[in-house]
Amino acid sequence: MDPKLLQNVSQEIYRRFPELLGRRPRVQAVKPGQNREDWGSILGEAKHLLVYSGRAVTSTGKQMPFIVRVVVNEQGKILKISSSR
């Protein structure tokens, strides 16, 4: 994935999830029809799955791990975001 596109997507994720600021995502290429979890083969194009891991502080002061998964197309457009929290 193009580093400039990755940086633009990461800026949007950092805006939505400030706890992830500075975290680097794990990037995985996903081809259409590669697996059953292909999100309905969105537009039938090649995509990238970005996985961000972080920790959030709860109201009781404890740290809670969470994961944010982002599906983007080749142009860097965010197609889907899901979070574990």
Image: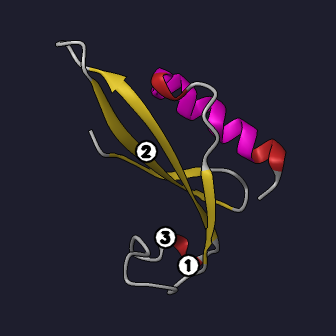
| Mark 2 element type | strand
Side of 69 relative to 64 (left or right): right
> Distance from label 1 to label 3 (Cα)?
5 Å
Q: Residues within 10 Å of mark 1 (few under 14, many from 20)?
A: few
Q: Nearer the viewer, residue 58 or 45?
A: 58
Disc 2: which residue? 68
Look at discs 2 and 3 and give the one toward the viewer: 2
- Give the label on residue 16, or none: none
Tag 1 near tag 3, CB within 8 Å: yes
Secondary structure character of the magenta stretch overall: helix
Side of 66 relative to 21 (left or right): left
Look at discs 1 and 2 and give the one toward the viewer: 2
The residue under the point 64% across, 37% down is 10
| Mark 1 element type | helix
Q: Give the residue type at disc 3.
A: Ile
Disc 1: which residue? 44
Disc 3: which residue? 42
The residue under the point 24% across, 13% down is 61
What's drawn in magenta, residue-wise?
6-18
| Mark 3 element type | helix
Q: Give the residue type at disc 2.
A: Val
The residue under the point 45% across, 35% down is 54
The mark total stands at 3
> Distance from label 1 to label 2 (Cα)?
23 Å
- Extreme residue toward the left, this view: 60
Q: Note whether 3 is above or below 34 in the view shown.
A: above
Q: Give the residue type at disc 1.
A: Gly
Q: Quadrant of the C terminus?
A: top left
Q: Quadrant of the N terminus?
A: bottom right
Mark positioned earlier in the residue sequence (2 or 3)? 3
Q: Position of residue 75 (x, y in %)?
A: 73, 56
